[in-house]
Image (tube, rainbow, N blue to C red):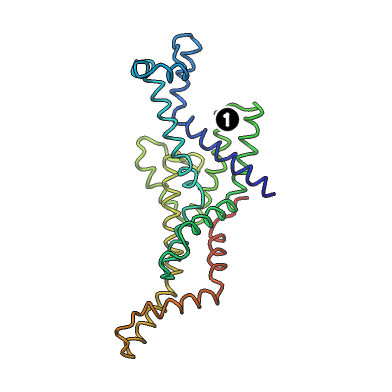
Amino acid sequence: MKADNRRIFGTFVCLAAVLICLSIGGSVLAQDSAGVADNHSPFELSNVLAGGPKSWTSPEGLSSTLQVMLMLTVLSLAPAALLMTTCFVRIVVVLGLLRQALGAQNLPPTQVITTLSLFLTLLIMTPVWKQVHEEAVVPYTRHEISLDEAWRAGVAPVRRFMSMQIERTGNTEDVWLFLSYLPNHPTPSSYDDVPLQALLPAFMLSELKTAFLIGFQIFLPFMILDMVVASVTVSMGMLMVPPALISLPLKLLLFVLVDGWHLVVGMLMQSFQPFL
C-alpha cells in the first residue's frame, strides 16, 4: 500500500510538471511542431544547443531558446504550484501558528513542521491523486486519450477538491473577487466554468483565511494562560521575573496533558471536506 502511494505521488508530481509546462508553452510548441512537419523550420533542440550564440540569437533559434528557458522556469516552479493546489498551505500555517502560541522559539524545528505537513498532505490528497492517476495518467500512457484530454481529466479532480474546500469554508466570495478582474468573462454557473487563473488564487486565499481562524482558536487558551501568569507575578511583586519564563513550562504541561498534537492534527484533518 505504501509503495502504491509513493508511486501515485511520484507519477502525479511528474505529470503536474509536464502538464504545467505544456499548458503554458503548448501553443508555441504546436506552432514549432507544425513548422517542422512542413519542413519550414530546421531548428531542433539539439541543433540549437550545439549551434552556439550565433544560432541562439538568430530569428529561428531565438524562438527555440525562449521555449527552453520557459520550460526550465516552469519546471522550477512546478513543486510550488503543486503545493499551492493542495491542503499543504492550511496545515503548515496552522502548525506554524501553534509553535508561536507555545512560545517555544524554534521548537519544533521548521524541518519537522514541514515534513509533518507534507505527510498529512499526502494522506489527505491520496484520493485526489489516485483519481488523477487512473483517469489521466494511465489512459495517456496507454495512448487511449490525447494530451488535451489527459490535461482536462487530470485537472478535474484537483478543481473539484479546491471547489469543495471553498464551499466547506464558505469563502465563495473569494472566487467572485478574482472573477471581477477577468474582463468580459461570462458568469459561471458552476465551479467547472471558473477559469483556473481565478480559482487557484481564490483557493489559496480561502485556505489562508481558514488557517488563521484555526490559529486564533489555538492561540486563545495560551494567551489566557499568559495573562493569568503575568497578573499573578505582578501581584506577587515579581517584577524582575519575565512572565514567559513561568508560563512556558505551564503551557507545555497543559499541551501534553490534553494530548495537544492529537487534537490539533485531528482538527486539521476534520476541517477538510472529504474527497469522495
Look at 62% across and 48% down and name the residue there.
Answer: 127
Look at 47% across and 19% down and name the residue there.
Answer: 46
Look at 56% across and 61% down and name the residue there.
Answer: 270
* Residue placed most toward the observer, 110 or 36: 110
Using the rendered view, name the quadrant where residue 59 is placed: top left
Amino acid type, label 1: Glu
* Residue placed most toward the observer, 215 or 67: 67
The crowd level at tag 1 (other Cα within 10 Å; few <14, some 14-19, many 20+) is some
Residue 240: x %, y % from top left: 30, 83
Q: Secondary structure at mark 1?
A: helix
Look at 62% across and 28% down and name the residue there.
Answer: 145
How many numbered discs? 1
Name the residue that disc number 1 marks.
149
Residue 49: x %, y % from top left: 43, 20
Q: Is residue 45 above or below residue 242?
A: above
Q: Residue furthest right?
A: 1
